[in-house]
Image (spheres, rainbow, N blue to C red):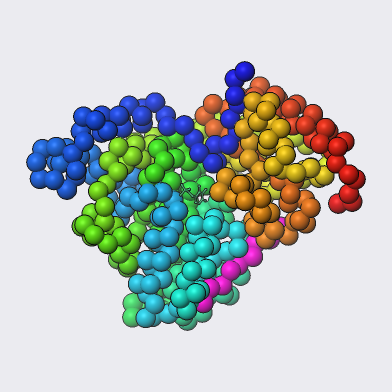
Amino acid sequence: MRQLYFDYAASTPVRDEVWEAMVPFFRRHYGNPSSLHSFGQEARSAVEKARQQVASALNCQSEEIFFTSGTSESDNWAIFGAARACQNRGKHLITSTIEHEAVLEAFRQLEKEGFQVTYLHPDKYGTIDPKKLMDAINSQTTLVSIMYANNEVGTIQSLPTIASMVGAIRRRRGREGTPLYLHTDAASGKYLPWTVDKLGVDLMSLGPHKYYGPKGVGILYVRKGVPINQFIYGGSQEKNQRAGTENVPAIVGAGLATKLMAKEKSRESKKLEKLQKKLTSLLVKEIKDIRLTGHPSQRVPDIVSLVIKGVEGEALVLHLNKMGMAVSSGSACTSTDLAPSHVLKAMGLKPELIHGSLRVSLGKETKTEDLTKLVTALSKTVKKLRDLAPKVEV
Ligand SMILES: *Cc1c(COP(=O)(O)O)cnc(C)c1O
């Protein structure tokens, strides 16, 4: 039986071109980029070429691109780095309650270190109101971090609006005033525009394994002039900011995957939008008592999220897995601890509904007929589980 994969938001396979570009850097070009001989120079030029590829995709300068070990590290570095670099000027920070744990936990740690953090609540669609954000900014605010799109429900935030409001406050404060920066975790915004200037962000995190690149490598964009504290101490890699021998094969893969994603995203997202429409209409038609979650239109094309009354999301995932289909009961990062999703909770869903949450994410290999198979299997499973479950009022 062919296994069907519907969890592209958790991770994706490395695409052929990327794999082929990476392979020589494991065993043939194995030099250390910091070495002066030709082995080292070869590795160095591969790393710098990848940096250039990412910079072109984001329409920025290559000095503004840093390689990390993943989106989690990029988020941590951006948040700790900027907050601490500005702490003599202000110790108030703003984020939202629907961020990824890599963002939320960084802010919680900063609270322990004496920072004040405002956590903005979304509306029922998972949207953060830019006006509420503006009201939360005070004279001590130095950093705002709002994700580009949510990884569980797919809602897109009005980042350009937020950026222009933050920019207006920054101009009002003036050159000598308290600094104010905007970070975004863009790991789930892979089908959205990446041009950082148009977006107006100062710091942006990306994770290539979400778009057919390798795991173990992340990207952090830092606009020129934005101060961030050093993250790893040791050697002078990544402009003296993040020590450690570069993960050359992964960086090579990250560069090419980012370049290809930027080139193909508008075509791919049109294709996915059609599949997404098809899937949502099938779900609504075939399964009773479900509710689609996230924003109805302001959403990424690869994620469909829903809650199903009277069943447990985890049970659905396990049953579907036995039937050869991989879906998620929320985000991959939290689905093993069985705690109800903090995102759905923040959106105001009742706990008994949250337990029935499911995320189906689509990608390159998804075909229309796969969606029919999935909905048929899901419908059968839901029926079976509902028949087994004791009746509860929801
Ligand atoms: C996947 C993801 C992360 C974490 O990425 P890692 O590769 O696990 O570090 C962070 N934020 C968002 C929005 C994500 O989708």
Q: How many marks?
A: 0
The location of residue 16, given as percent across then percent down, is 39, 26
Q: Residue furthest top?
A: 1
Residue at 62% across, 47% down: 335
Say whether residue 71 is left or right of residue 56. right
Asked if residue 3 is positioned above or below residue 314 in the image, the reply reads above
Q: Residue furthest left?
A: 37
Q: Examine the structure image and report whether residue 123 is included in the region drawn in magenta.
A: yes
Asked if residue 275 is positioned above or below residue 310 in the image, the reply reads above
**Residue nearest the viewer, comparing 262 with 16:** 16
The location of residue 61, given as percent across then percent down, is 28, 52
Say whether residue 191 is left or right of residue 84. right
**Residue nearest the viewer, comparing 359 with 292:** 359
Q: Examine the structure image and report whether residue 281 is included in the region drawn in magenta.
A: no
Quadrant containing the N terminus in the rendered view = top right
Residue 168 shows in the view:
no
Q: Quadrant of residue 249?
A: top left
The location of residue 127, given as percent across then percent down, is 63, 58
The location of residue 332, given as percent across then percent down, is 57, 45
Say whether residue 350 is left or right of residue 264. right
Say whether residue 381 is left or right of residue 346. right
Residue at 27% across, 41% down: 248
Residue 345 shows in the view:
yes
Residue at 86% across, 51% down: 394
Residue at 55% across, 48% down: 333
Which segment is the magenta one? 116-125
Asked if residue 380 is positioned above or below residue 223 in the image, the reply reads above
